[in-house]
Amino acid sequence: MKIAFIGVGLMGRPMVENLLAAGHSLILWNRTATKAQSFAARAVIAANVAEAIAQADVVITMLENGPIVRAVVFNEDSLAAFRPGTLFIDMSSIPPAMAREHAQWLDARGCYALDAPVSGGTIGAAQATLSIMVGGAQEAYARAQSLFSALGTARYMGEAGTGQVAKLANQAIVGITIGAVSEALLLAEKAGADPRAVREALLGGFAASRILELHGQRMIDRQFSPGARATVQLKDMGMIVGEAEQVGLNMPLAELTKTLYHDMVEGGFGDLDHSGLFVWLEKRSQA
Amino acid sequence: MKIAFIGVGLMGRPMVENLLAAGHSLILWNRTATKAQSFAARAVIAANVAEAIAQADVVITMLENGPIVRAVVFNEDSLAAFRPGTLFIDMSSIPPAMAREHAQWLDARGCYALDAPVSGGTIGAAQATLSIMVGGAQEAYARAQSLFSALGTARYMGEAGTGQVAKLANQAIVGITIGAVSEALLLAEKAGADPRAVREALLGGFAASRILELHGQRMIDRQFSPGARATVQLKDMGMIVGEAEQVGLNMPLAELTKTLYHDMVEGGFGDLDHSGLFVWLEKRSQA
């Protein structure tokens, strides 16, 4: 089984390492070619995307967003390079509606598609502990198991697009919980409690979360270098609210969190880590 | 050291068990006397609160809210029963301002006071794994260590009232996160993803929390018998927003969550567990 891996960036690089370590045969492509070159001794480096796809049984993408996936994989040349039976696994985070379209287009060519975005970040990618949320046909999911197991833990969410839906659910919780932890630690600080002790105590009770653990520490240390930028969290919140509108759901907390990130980005704090919402909420109270 | 324990309800009962198991000598009082009677073979049952306080070196309260603590312990008779040097430990959840007043009144009598509310619920109480958030004088905190260690893990938050501040921070995160998990699982369901698989996948990534673990399961099972009632969560959200106003902090997510719980209670769902916000948010979208 030959795998084309497209997008060897912060996330893609450690994932390629893990696939190689599991004995898979890889063809790589990256927009900035130098990022793929370091793998030249252990993988084939393709001159262009179509060349990579044409040789592959499985095509994995790990790109920045939906429009980039569309531009790179669903242009005329790249799409024409898919041979019938090829399995496309998009591990990028893109809107569910876009993922459903990609699945339809590939189905029309006799190919298979899975949307398989991840949670766990660069650390999860490096440690092969990514949580992989998969949408698409169940036969295709079964076929991808050996690949997923080299990268983390995969779970089947349902039809095409539902992997992306699960990722949006993930991002909604992440964004709102960052807001919750920010407000709680600001309250603690302003009311004279020791925020470090508060964080530790709360990790021992019902308020415990990975956000409180990791981002709560960042807030206490006021260390907001990204990580995942606030601009990206704002983009995610937009996708969440958009998907909610499409299915007729009110998400009042997600909508408010989108507004808070919007104001934070407008206020010039967009390049902070998303946990930097803490400083924006602090600033907002001082105004 | 003789301990008066006042309030042998859902939380107090297992805490009394753990204090007895650790070898402490107890005098009990409960408003509904029958709840204390089952301990008659192992502890002294006081006829009234003043009698319990008068015999005690340490007075622990575990009552429903601030007004009840005030009515039970800070009436003329009870207050007069405190001997100089007595340590008062209020493990109830009450407003920080009220806890500060109690500390002042006891200080004026030559007594000591700690506010020491807990997180972890009846399970944490039974297993002696409560997270105990303590405010007050550090000497008093040191004196209470052997008691706290029989009940869970205590941490020192700062001056009088900061234990209650930490508890409010806890409740803010709990309430907002219940909202976040509700919205996320509703989105998953409405957009065709399997909520059970989504919950599991999200527990493996950055969205992981005890709320997602415990209350996410309740939402999937639609099992909302309390637990902690929505009415109580609403009361907590009110205390949080009140304290935030006092210290000049905006808590937009806490304010919105307060409004959501308010509407839920007004809508007749106040006796559901606080995780039942899920059904209120669902209903709200159908309106």
Image (cartoon, coloured by chain):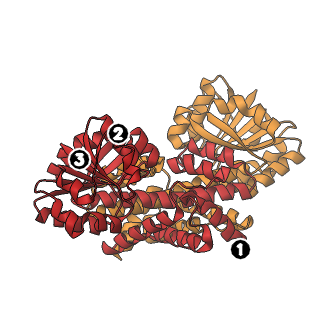
Chain colours: A red, B orange
Residue A167 or B142: which is nearer the viewer? A167
Mark positioned earlier in the residue sequence (3 or 2): 3
Question: In the structure shown, which secondary structural element does the residue marked by tag 1 occupy?
Answer: loop
The amino acid beneath tag 3 is Ile
Q: Residues within 10 Å of mark 2 (few under 14, many from 20)?
A: many
Numbered label tally: 3
Identify the image quadrant of the N terminus of chain B.
Answer: top right
Residue A266 horizontal/vertical position (percent): 58, 74
Which residue bears the numbered disc 1?
A287
Question: In the structure shown, which secondary structural element does the residue marked by tag 2 occupy?
Answer: helix
Marks 3/1: CA–CA distance: 54 Å
In the image, what residue occupies the spot 23% across and 47% down?
A: A3
Left or right: A169 as drawn, with respect to A227: left
Q: Are marks 1 and 2 on the same chain?
A: yes
User: Between tags 3 and 1, which lies in front?
Assistant: 3
The amino acid beneath tag 2 is Asn
Identify the image quadrant of the C terminus of chain B.
Answer: bottom left
Furthest residue toward bottom? B287
Which residue bears the numbered disc 3?
A3
In the image, what residue occupies the spot 36% across and 43% down?
A: A39
Residue B105, relative to residue A169: is it above or below? Answer: above
Which residue bears the numbered disc 2?
A18
Chain of residue at mark 2: A
Q: Residues within 10 Å of mark 3 (few under 14, many from 20)?
A: many
Please give the label number shown on residue A214.
Answer: none
Left or right: B150 as drawn, with respect to B220: right
Residue B217 horizontal/vertical position (percent): 37, 49
